[in-house]
Amino acid sequence: MPAMRRNAAAILILCALALAACGTAPATPESSPSPTTLAGQVARLSDEDLAGQVLMPYAYGQDATKVSAGAAKANQKLAGVTTPAELVTKLRLGGVILVGFEAGDPTAQDTANIDDPAQVRKFTAGLQAAAAKLPAGTPLLIGTDQEYGVVTRVKSGVTLLPSAMALGAANQPELTEAAWRTAGTELAAMGINVDFAPDADVQGASSVIGSRSFGSDSKLVAEQAAAAVRGLQAAGVAATLKHFPGHGRPAADSHGDLPQLQQTRQELTEIDLPPFQAGIAAGVQLVMSGHLDVRSIDPGMPASFSAKVLEGVLRQQLGFDGVVVTDALNMAPAERWPAGEAAVRALQAGNDLLLMPPDPVAAYNGILTALKNGKLSRDRLRASVTRILTLKRAVTDDDQPGLDVLAGQAHQSAVAAAASAAVTQLRGACGAPLVTGAVSVTAAKGRDASRDRLVKALQAQGVRVEQSTPPADAKVVHLVGYGDTAGDLNPKATITVAMDTPYVLTKSASPVLLATYSSSPLSLEALAKVLAGKAKAEGRSPVAVNGLPKSSCS
């Protein structure tokens, strides 16, 4: 069903964007587009409708119409409304992003919409009910950043995939596709129809993107990104490749700085662009423009505001004809301009969907003013809205899965296969059980939940775990995760495990080193099986770890 809708939508978009396409003559009073066609639908939209359709802000609260006093106050400050539903109505929105953050999340903002799957489904249904009353008569795009690993919005009650880097270590695209199909099905059940994933950045020496990247080999990243796209979109959820044209190499983080990409055009073409090309070939429906200074193309201008990058490279060179969405406009590189001006500049550069403007009312009014004074043409805005409505037709499905699909056995099994294939041994003899006799599990500060989960998983595999008073000869398994450094290592550990990027392992003296690249429940269960000798460490590190092989078991 989703594939059929996408094919039909592709035909409609071609008809709408090229007036002579499909044998259609330019519109005249006698041959105006039918209001039932996509072109007709866009033609009848007012300026206010057009301006709202390209906006995807966040709102405060965990329900569309009933929010806490604090959330109501925050919404008043944000946009002069009380509830998320009122924001949809006031700005005639085309989309809303759901956010949810915890300490340590590298993309953290100051609001959270997400509690659990049942709450999310009720919330999204309420948002769609508000959108149904708008003059445009189109459903909302409801998106979130469900990358898995360190950027995961819905954390409970769902099947948690291992990180992108873990899937790169497994390097089995069929497992990646199956895992992401599971993810898409569960997102759809909650009413989320756009996922701002997968990350198509090729990891370089920088640690900014880290385990959000599939790895440092362009071909591997391309294969994995395409597989993730196929999986998500097979479930009817639109995938998003990010951060175009590649955030894997600069040392600066675009949340606070404007990172510089020093690559030549040839280096970009050979290394950074292939994952985006592969995802586009797989039919990806969105590409996110990055707040990145591409020195070889448009020096000094963020790619997210550069027509040379978005129109010249993404549209013309790579042939992408789907929706281009900005990275969050409340990030520092985008806030060099007032919100209204930034919105207009982003559209002029080639973006279609404006994500998280810091002042959504100013963004909305800025677009309307630019339409009136001619700084932004209606044809340009209508082209974006046409792509957005095409996307909506592709991801809107009356057959929404029920919440009973979440974390089901079939989903757990599909993802467990990928998590198991990711476990990598970078030091130590392979084959025999890595733990015999008594075992004690320690962890870096703040990793108590992972430690406790591994203890239970080891016990389920028949391993004797002695936590309170371990004997002197007990093997010590030590866990480190996202952001941990050499200071978080246990010098007495027999086995050290990296649950995020494996770089910290170069500082460990443990005779056995393992990497799961993820602290998800299924990743730790897979680790327990390897430690107990019930499974092999089949993964290979998808990034180079100084002084260590990519696997000591192959």
Image (spheres, rainbow, N blue to C red):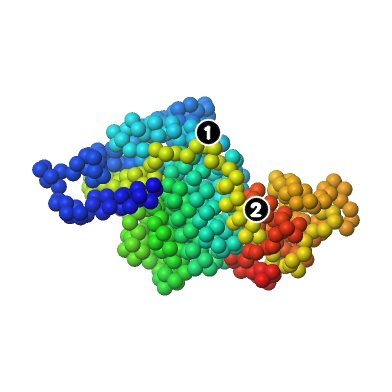
- Disc 2 marks which residue? 523
Furthest-left residue in this view: 30
Dot 2: what SS?
helix
Image spot of residue 224 (x, y percent): 51, 61
For mark 1, does the 10 Å Cα neighbourhood hold few (<14), some (14 to 19), or many (20 or more) residues?
some
- Who's the residue at 23% across and 45% down the image? 39
Q: Quadrant of the C terminus?
A: bottom right
| Mark 2 residue type | Ser
- Disc 1 marks which residue? 119
- Who's the residue at 32% across and 47% down the image? 390
Which residue is at the front of the view, 229 or 462? 462
Residue 422's tag is none
Image spot of residue 262 (x, y percent): 46, 68
- Who's the residue at 61% across and 69% down the image? 544
**Could you tell which of marks 2 and 1 lies nearer the N-terminus?**
1
Relative placement, left or right, of 239 versus 414 is: left
Dot 1: what SS?
helix
Image spot of residue 435 (x, y percent): 79, 58
| Mark 1 residue type | Gln
**Viewer-nearest of discs 2 and 1:** 2
Q: CA distance from mark 2 to mark 1?
A: 26 Å
Relative placement, left or right, of 482 versus 151 is: right
- Who's the residue at 62% across and 66% down the image? 540
